[in-house]
Amino acid sequence: MTKLQVDLAPIPSHVLEHSAEAQREKNRAKREQYNKGKVSEVKLTVNEQSNDVESLKKEINNLTEENKNLKTEKRDLKNEMRLMEAEIRSLNKKIIDGDIGSEDVDIKCDKNNAYSNNVRQTVIQLMSNVGVSAENCSKVIKIVSEGVCNKKIHQKLPCGQTCLNIALEGQVISDIHTAESVLSSDAVAVHSDGTSRDPKKVVNHQITTDKGHTFFLGFTIVATEDANTVFDVTINILRRIVTTYCDFKEKDQNEIFVQFLKKIRATMTDRAAVMKCFSKKFEEFLSSEIGEDVQLKLLNCNAHFLLGMSGACDKAFKKVEADIKHDTNEAIGRDKDKQFSRFSGEGETCTSRVIRVACDILGPPGDQKSGLSFAKKASCLASREIGLTVSLKPPQQ
Protein backbone atom coordinates (compact mmCIF):
# COMPACT_ATOMS: atom_id res chain seq x y z
CA MET A 1 0.00 0.00 0.00
CA THR A 2 1.11 3.49 -0.71
CA LYS A 3 0.70 6.25 1.89
CA LEU A 4 -1.58 9.08 0.99
CA GLN A 5 0.34 12.21 1.32
CA VAL A 6 -1.43 15.51 1.63
CA ASP A 7 0.42 18.63 1.19
CA LEU A 8 -0.98 21.42 3.45
CA ALA A 9 -0.45 24.93 2.51
CA PRO A 10 1.09 27.09 5.21
CA ILE A 11 -1.42 29.30 7.26
CA PRO A 12 -0.70 32.95 7.16
CA SER A 13 0.42 34.56 10.41
CA HIS A 14 -2.23 37.26 10.41
CA VAL A 15 -4.92 34.60 10.29
CA LEU A 16 -3.42 32.83 13.30
CA GLU A 17 -3.21 36.10 15.21
CA HIS A 18 -6.87 36.93 14.44
CA SER A 19 -8.00 33.48 15.56
CA ALA A 20 -5.99 33.72 18.76
CA GLU A 21 -7.41 37.18 19.51
CA ALA A 22 -10.97 35.88 18.98
CA GLN A 23 -10.29 33.00 21.34
CA ARG A 24 -8.92 35.37 23.97
CA GLU A 25 -12.04 37.60 23.73
CA LYS A 26 -14.24 34.56 24.11
CA ASN A 27 -12.32 33.44 27.19
CA ARG A 28 -12.42 36.95 28.63
CA ALA A 29 -16.25 37.09 28.18
CA LYS A 30 -16.60 33.74 29.91
CA ARG A 31 -14.47 34.90 32.82
CA GLU A 32 -16.50 38.13 33.16
CA GLN A 33 -19.75 36.17 33.09
CA TYR A 34 -18.41 33.78 35.71
CA ASN A 35 -17.17 36.64 37.88
CA LYS A 36 -20.53 38.42 37.64
CA GLY A 37 -22.27 35.26 38.83
CA LYS A 38 -19.87 34.96 41.73
CA VAL A 39 -20.38 38.63 42.64
CA SER A 40 -24.17 38.15 42.61
CA GLU A 41 -23.88 35.15 44.87
CA VAL A 42 -21.62 37.05 47.24
CA LYS A 43 -24.03 40.02 47.32
CA LEU A 44 -26.99 37.70 48.03
CA THR A 45 -25.03 36.04 50.82
CA VAL A 46 -24.09 39.43 52.26
CA ASN A 47 -27.73 40.59 52.18
CA GLU A 48 -28.88 37.42 53.92
CA GLN A 49 -26.22 37.82 56.55
CA SER A 50 -27.20 41.48 57.02
CA ASN A 51 -30.84 40.42 57.58
CA ASP A 52 -29.67 37.81 60.05
CA VAL A 53 -27.63 40.42 61.86
CA GLU A 54 -30.63 42.78 62.08
CA SER A 55 -32.83 39.94 63.32
CA LEU A 56 -30.26 39.02 65.93
CA LYS A 57 -29.99 42.66 67.00
CA LYS A 58 -33.78 42.84 67.50
CA GLU A 59 -33.74 39.57 69.42
CA ILE A 60 -30.92 40.88 71.58
CA ASN A 61 -32.90 44.09 72.26
CA ASN A 62 -36.01 42.06 73.15
CA LEU A 63 -34.02 39.82 75.45
CA THR A 64 -32.42 42.87 77.04
CA GLU A 65 -35.85 44.44 77.64
CA GLU A 66 -37.25 41.16 78.96
CA ASN A 67 -34.27 40.81 81.26
CA LYS A 68 -34.87 44.34 82.51
CA ASN A 69 -38.55 43.57 83.15
CA LEU A 70 -37.65 40.37 84.94
CA LYS A 71 -35.25 42.26 87.17
CA THR A 72 -38.00 44.78 87.98
CA GLU A 73 -40.48 41.98 88.67
CA LYS A 74 -37.91 40.24 90.83
CA ARG A 75 -37.40 43.43 92.83
CA ASP A 76 -41.18 43.90 93.24
CA LEU A 77 -41.60 40.30 94.34
CA LYS A 78 -38.86 40.73 96.90
CA ASN A 79 -40.60 43.83 98.27
CA GLU A 80 -43.93 42.02 98.33
CA MET A 81 -42.31 39.07 100.07
CA ARG A 82 -40.88 41.38 102.73
CA LEU A 83 -44.32 42.92 103.28
CA MET A 84 -45.95 39.51 103.54
CA GLU A 85 -43.30 38.35 105.98
CA ALA A 86 -43.98 41.45 108.09
CA GLU A 87 -47.72 40.76 107.95
CA ILE A 88 -47.13 37.14 108.95
CA ARG A 89 -45.04 38.28 111.93
CA SER A 90 -47.79 40.73 112.90
CA LEU A 91 -50.51 38.05 112.64
CA ASN A 92 -48.41 35.59 114.64
CA LYS A 93 -48.02 38.22 117.33
CA LYS A 94 -51.78 38.81 117.37
CA ILE A 95 -52.41 35.08 117.64
CA ILE A 96 -50.01 34.86 120.57
CA ASP A 97 -51.55 37.94 122.21
CA GLY A 98 -55.05 36.56 121.65
CA ASP A 99 -56.52 39.56 119.81
CA ILE A 100 -56.51 38.26 116.24
CA GLY A 101 -60.11 39.32 115.70
CA SER A 102 -59.85 42.73 117.32
CA GLU A 103 -58.63 45.10 114.67
CA ASP A 104 -59.59 48.45 113.22
CA VAL A 105 -61.73 48.71 110.10
CA ASP A 106 -60.84 51.07 107.29
CA ILE A 107 -64.06 52.55 105.97
CA LYS A 108 -62.62 55.20 103.65
CA CYS A 109 -61.23 54.89 100.12
CA ASP A 110 -58.00 56.55 99.05
CA LYS A 111 -59.82 58.35 96.22
CA ASN A 112 -61.43 61.65 97.32
CA ASN A 113 -61.59 60.34 100.91
CA ALA A 114 -64.99 58.80 100.07
CA TYR A 115 -66.60 55.94 101.94
CA SER A 116 -65.77 52.47 100.65
CA ASN A 117 -68.20 50.45 98.56
CA ASN A 118 -68.73 48.04 101.46
CA VAL A 119 -69.96 50.89 103.67
CA ARG A 120 -72.17 52.31 100.93
CA GLN A 121 -73.68 48.91 100.18
CA THR A 122 -74.30 48.28 103.87
CA VAL A 123 -76.13 51.61 104.22
CA ILE A 124 -78.26 50.87 101.16
CA GLN A 125 -79.22 47.43 102.48
CA LEU A 126 -79.98 48.72 105.97
CA MET A 127 -82.27 51.43 104.65
CA SER A 128 -83.96 49.45 101.85
CA ASN A 129 -84.13 45.89 103.17
CA VAL A 130 -84.34 46.31 106.96
CA GLY A 131 -85.99 49.70 107.29
CA VAL A 132 -83.27 51.36 109.38
CA SER A 133 -83.56 55.13 109.36
CA ALA A 134 -80.80 57.31 107.94
CA GLU A 135 -80.00 58.70 111.39
CA ASN A 136 -79.51 55.21 112.88
CA CYS A 137 -77.53 53.52 110.08
CA SER A 138 -74.13 54.44 111.50
CA LYS A 139 -75.14 53.36 115.01
CA VAL A 140 -76.25 49.95 113.72
CA ILE A 141 -73.03 49.48 111.72
CA LYS A 142 -70.86 50.32 114.71
CA ILE A 143 -72.79 48.09 117.12
CA VAL A 144 -72.72 45.08 114.78
CA SER A 145 -69.07 45.59 113.86
CA GLU A 146 -67.87 45.75 117.48
CA GLY A 147 -70.34 43.33 119.02
CA VAL A 148 -70.49 40.58 116.39
CA CYS A 149 -67.31 40.97 114.34
CA ASN A 150 -65.06 42.28 117.16
CA LYS A 151 -63.77 45.03 114.88
CA LYS A 152 -63.53 48.61 116.06
CA ILE A 153 -64.36 51.58 113.85
CA HIS A 154 -62.50 54.72 114.87
CA GLN A 155 -63.18 56.71 111.71
CA LYS A 156 -66.29 58.82 111.41
CA LEU A 157 -69.21 56.90 109.93
CA PRO A 158 -71.63 58.62 107.50
CA CYS A 159 -74.06 61.05 109.06
CA GLY A 160 -77.80 61.03 108.39
CA GLN A 161 -77.63 63.30 105.36
CA THR A 162 -74.77 61.28 103.87
CA CYS A 163 -76.81 58.10 104.35
CA LEU A 164 -79.67 59.75 102.46
CA ASN A 165 -77.28 60.63 99.63
CA ILE A 166 -76.01 57.05 99.55
CA ALA A 167 -79.63 55.86 99.45
CA LEU A 168 -80.13 58.02 96.35
CA GLU A 169 -77.15 56.26 94.78
CA GLY A 170 -78.89 52.99 95.57
CA GLN A 171 -82.03 54.32 93.85
CA VAL A 172 -80.00 55.04 90.70
CA ILE A 173 -78.49 51.54 90.76
CA SER A 174 -81.96 50.08 91.30
CA ASP A 175 -83.41 52.03 88.35
CA ILE A 176 -80.63 50.85 86.03
CA HIS A 177 -81.09 47.23 87.15
CA THR A 178 -84.88 47.51 86.72
CA ALA A 179 -84.55 48.93 83.20
CA GLU A 180 -82.09 46.23 82.15
CA SER A 181 -84.38 43.49 83.49
CA VAL A 182 -87.49 44.92 81.81
CA LEU A 183 -85.76 45.39 78.45
CA SER A 184 -84.43 41.82 78.55
CA SER A 185 -87.91 40.38 79.33
CA ASP A 186 -90.67 39.45 76.94
CA ALA A 187 -93.51 40.82 79.07
CA VAL A 188 -93.91 42.68 82.38
CA ALA A 189 -96.80 43.78 84.58
CA VAL A 190 -97.11 47.13 86.35
CA HIS A 191 -99.02 47.11 89.63
CA SER A 192 -99.69 49.83 92.13
CA ASP A 193 -101.47 50.28 95.42
CA GLY A 194 -102.40 53.20 97.63
CA THR A 195 -102.54 53.57 101.38
CA SER A 196 -102.73 56.26 104.06
CA ARG A 197 -99.92 56.85 106.53
CA ASP A 198 -100.70 59.34 109.23
CA PRO A 199 -102.75 61.94 107.36
CA LYS A 200 -100.81 61.47 104.11
CA LYS A 201 -101.81 59.41 101.08
CA VAL A 202 -99.03 57.23 99.63
CA VAL A 203 -98.92 55.34 96.32
CA ASN A 204 -96.40 52.58 95.68
CA HIS A 205 -95.49 50.97 92.34
CA GLN A 206 -93.92 47.66 91.37
CA ILE A 207 -92.94 45.85 88.18
CA THR A 208 -93.00 42.05 87.80
CA THR A 209 -91.20 40.40 84.88
CA ASP A 210 -92.08 37.17 83.09
CA LYS A 211 -89.20 35.51 84.98
CA GLY A 212 -91.01 36.09 88.28
CA HIS A 213 -88.77 38.92 89.52
CA THR A 214 -90.53 41.85 91.20
CA PHE A 215 -88.89 45.28 91.40
CA PHE A 216 -90.10 47.89 93.88
CA LEU A 217 -90.22 51.38 92.36
CA GLY A 218 -90.72 53.37 95.55
CA PHE A 219 -93.38 55.33 97.45
CA THR A 220 -94.87 58.60 96.25
CA ILE A 221 -96.83 60.99 98.46
CA VAL A 222 -99.91 62.39 96.68
CA ALA A 223 -102.54 64.96 97.62
CA THR A 224 -105.46 62.94 96.24
CA GLU A 225 -105.57 59.37 94.99
CA ASP A 226 -107.60 59.93 91.83
CA ALA A 227 -107.06 58.40 88.38
CA ASN A 228 -105.22 61.38 86.90
CA THR A 229 -102.82 61.63 89.85
CA VAL A 230 -102.00 57.90 89.84
CA PHE A 231 -101.55 58.03 86.05
CA ASP A 232 -99.17 61.03 86.23
CA VAL A 233 -97.16 59.42 89.05
CA THR A 234 -96.86 56.15 87.10
CA ILE A 235 -95.65 57.85 83.91
CA ASN A 236 -93.16 59.98 85.85
CA ILE A 237 -91.71 56.88 87.51
CA LEU A 238 -91.34 55.05 84.20
CA ARG A 239 -89.69 58.09 82.60
CA ARG A 240 -87.33 58.43 85.58
CA ILE A 241 -86.20 54.81 85.21
CA VAL A 242 -85.62 55.15 81.45
CA THR A 243 -83.85 58.52 81.83
CA THR A 244 -81.47 57.13 84.46
CA TYR A 245 -80.73 54.08 82.31
CA CYS A 246 -80.14 56.12 79.12
CA ASP A 247 -77.87 58.60 80.91
CA PHE A 248 -75.77 55.71 82.18
CA LYS A 249 -75.73 53.78 78.88
CA GLU A 250 -75.64 56.91 76.65
CA LYS A 251 -78.66 55.81 74.59
CA ASP A 252 -81.59 57.63 73.00
CA GLN A 253 -84.32 58.18 75.60
CA ASN A 254 -87.28 58.28 73.20
CA GLU A 255 -86.31 55.01 71.53
CA ILE A 256 -85.65 53.20 74.82
CA PHE A 257 -88.88 54.58 76.35
CA VAL A 258 -90.93 53.09 73.50
CA GLN A 259 -89.10 49.75 73.86
CA PHE A 260 -89.77 49.88 77.61
CA LEU A 261 -93.50 50.53 77.09
CA LYS A 262 -93.78 47.67 74.58
CA LYS A 263 -92.79 45.24 77.33
CA ILE A 264 -95.81 46.19 79.49
CA ARG A 265 -98.57 43.66 78.89
CA ALA A 266 -100.66 43.89 82.08
CA THR A 267 -101.57 46.02 85.08
CA MET A 268 -102.70 44.88 88.51
CA THR A 269 -104.67 47.17 90.80
CA ASP A 270 -107.42 46.95 93.39
CA ARG A 271 -111.05 46.83 92.33
CA ALA A 272 -111.73 50.53 92.93
CA ALA A 273 -113.33 52.60 90.19
CA VAL A 274 -110.36 55.00 90.33
CA MET A 275 -107.94 52.23 89.32
CA LYS A 276 -110.23 51.06 86.51
CA CYS A 277 -110.14 54.58 85.09
CA PHE A 278 -106.35 54.64 85.55
CA SER A 279 -105.93 51.36 83.64
CA LYS A 280 -107.97 52.74 80.75
CA LYS A 281 -105.93 55.96 80.60
CA PHE A 282 -102.70 53.97 80.83
CA GLU A 283 -103.81 51.69 77.99
CA GLU A 284 -104.61 54.72 75.79
CA PHE A 285 -101.23 56.27 76.62
CA LEU A 286 -99.39 53.09 75.58
CA SER A 287 -101.28 52.96 72.29
CA SER A 288 -100.42 56.59 71.48
CA GLU A 289 -96.73 56.23 72.39
CA ILE A 290 -96.13 52.90 70.67
CA GLY A 291 -98.21 53.74 67.61
CA GLU A 292 -100.39 50.64 67.64
CA ASP A 293 -103.45 49.37 69.46
CA VAL A 294 -102.52 47.96 72.87
CA GLN A 295 -104.79 45.62 74.81
CA LEU A 296 -103.58 45.23 78.38
CA LYS A 297 -104.49 42.41 80.70
CA LEU A 298 -106.24 44.19 83.56
CA LEU A 299 -105.57 42.14 86.68
CA ASN A 300 -107.13 42.78 90.09
CA CYS A 301 -105.55 42.18 93.47
CA ASN A 302 -107.62 39.65 95.45
CA ALA A 303 -106.30 40.91 98.79
CA HIS A 304 -108.70 43.86 98.77
CA PHE A 305 -111.61 41.58 97.90
CA LEU A 306 -110.69 39.18 100.71
CA LEU A 307 -110.31 42.06 103.18
CA GLY A 308 -113.73 43.34 102.20
CA MET A 309 -115.22 39.88 102.55
CA SER A 310 -113.56 39.51 105.95
CA GLY A 311 -115.06 42.78 107.12
CA ALA A 312 -118.52 41.79 105.89
CA CYS A 313 -118.28 38.36 107.55
CA ASP A 314 -117.14 39.94 110.81
CA LYS A 315 -120.20 42.19 110.83
CA ALA A 316 -122.43 39.16 110.21
CA PHE A 317 -120.74 37.19 113.02
CA LYS A 318 -121.25 40.09 115.40
CA LYS A 319 -124.96 40.17 114.64
CA VAL A 320 -125.34 36.38 115.01
CA GLU A 321 -123.44 36.33 118.30
CA ALA A 322 -125.42 39.30 119.59
CA ASP A 323 -128.68 37.47 118.79
CA ILE A 324 -127.42 34.29 120.53
CA LYS A 325 -126.36 36.26 123.60
CA HIS A 326 -129.75 38.02 123.65
CA ASP A 327 -131.71 34.75 123.34
CA THR A 328 -129.62 32.72 125.81
CA ASN A 329 -128.70 35.60 128.10
CA GLU A 330 -125.20 34.10 128.20
CA ALA A 331 -121.90 35.12 126.66
CA ILE A 332 -120.10 32.94 124.11
CA GLY A 333 -116.69 31.35 124.44
CA ARG A 334 -114.22 32.75 126.90
CA ASP A 335 -116.41 35.80 127.58
CA LYS A 336 -118.60 33.74 129.93
CA ASP A 337 -115.57 32.81 132.05
CA LYS A 338 -115.01 35.29 134.85
CA GLN A 339 -111.22 35.12 134.66
CA PHE A 340 -111.42 36.56 131.14
CA SER A 341 -113.99 39.21 131.98
CA ARG A 342 -111.49 42.04 131.78
CA PHE A 343 -110.56 40.97 128.22
CA SER A 344 -114.10 40.90 126.91
CA GLY A 345 -115.22 43.65 124.61
CA GLU A 346 -117.17 44.48 121.51
CA GLY A 347 -114.14 44.80 119.22
CA GLU A 348 -113.67 41.15 118.23
CA THR A 349 -116.17 38.35 117.81
CA CYS A 350 -115.70 34.90 119.31
CA THR A 351 -115.54 33.32 115.85
CA SER A 352 -112.84 35.77 114.65
CA ARG A 353 -110.86 35.18 117.83
CA VAL A 354 -110.92 31.39 117.37
CA ILE A 355 -109.76 31.74 113.77
CA ARG A 356 -106.99 34.15 114.73
CA VAL A 357 -105.75 32.00 117.60
CA ALA A 358 -105.77 28.89 115.38
CA CYS A 359 -103.69 30.72 112.77
CA ASP A 360 -101.26 31.96 115.43
CA ILE A 361 -100.82 28.47 116.87
CA LEU A 362 -100.57 26.55 113.59
CA GLY A 363 -98.54 29.17 111.71
CA PRO A 364 -94.73 29.13 111.48
CA PRO A 365 -94.17 31.76 114.23
CA GLY A 366 -96.37 29.93 116.73
CA ASP A 367 -94.90 26.56 115.82
CA GLN A 368 -91.68 27.52 117.59
CA LYS A 369 -93.56 27.41 120.90
CA SER A 370 -96.36 24.90 120.39
CA GLY A 371 -94.92 22.53 117.79
CA LEU A 372 -98.42 21.97 116.40
CA SER A 373 -97.63 23.08 112.85
CA PHE A 374 -95.78 19.81 112.20
CA ALA A 375 -98.70 17.84 113.65
CA LYS A 376 -101.13 19.76 111.43
CA LYS A 377 -99.07 18.97 108.31
CA ALA A 378 -98.87 15.32 109.33
CA SER A 379 -102.63 15.28 109.80
CA CYS A 380 -103.27 16.80 106.38
CA LEU A 381 -100.82 14.41 104.73
CA ALA A 382 -102.36 11.38 106.41
CA SER A 383 -105.87 12.50 105.55
CA ARG A 384 -104.93 12.92 101.90
CA GLU A 385 -102.96 9.70 101.48
CA ILE A 386 -104.70 7.08 103.65
CA GLY A 387 -107.99 8.78 104.48
CA LEU A 388 -107.31 8.93 108.20
CA THR A 389 -107.93 11.90 110.47
CA VAL A 390 -105.24 12.56 113.04
CA SER A 391 -106.33 14.56 116.06
CA LEU A 392 -104.12 17.45 117.08
CA LYS A 393 -105.05 16.93 120.73
CA PRO A 394 -102.50 15.07 122.88
CA PRO A 395 -103.59 11.57 123.97
CA GLN A 396 -105.34 11.31 127.31
CA GLN A 397 -103.18 9.88 130.06
Image (cartoon, helix red, strand yellow):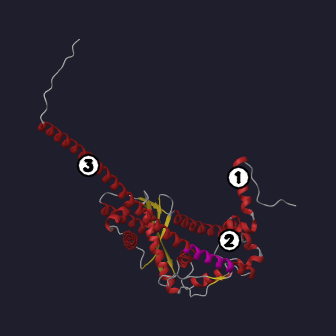
* Secondary-structure class at tag 3: helix
Q: Is residue 83 magenta?
A: yes
| Residue position marked by numbered label 1 in the rendering | 381
Amino acid identity at mark 2: His
Rounded to the nearest angstrom, the CA distance separating label 1 from label 2 is 42 Å
Which residues are the magenta region? 75-90
Pick whichever of labels 1 and 2 is earlier in the sequence.
2
Relative to 160, is 374 above or below?
Answer: above
Mark 2 Cα-neighbour bin, 10 Å: few <14, some 14–19, many ≥20: few
Rounded to the nearest angstrom, the CA distance separating label 3 from label 1 is 107 Å
Pick whichever of labels 3 and 1 is earlier in the sequence.
3
Residue at the spot 63% in from the left edge and 70% down from the top edge: 318
| Residue position marked by numbered label 3 in the rendering | 36
Q: Nearer the viewer, mark 3 or mark 2?
A: 3
| Residue position marked by numbered label 2 in the rendering | 326
Observer-nearest residue: 262 or 283?
262
Image coordinates for residue 80, horizontal then vertical, percent: 58, 75
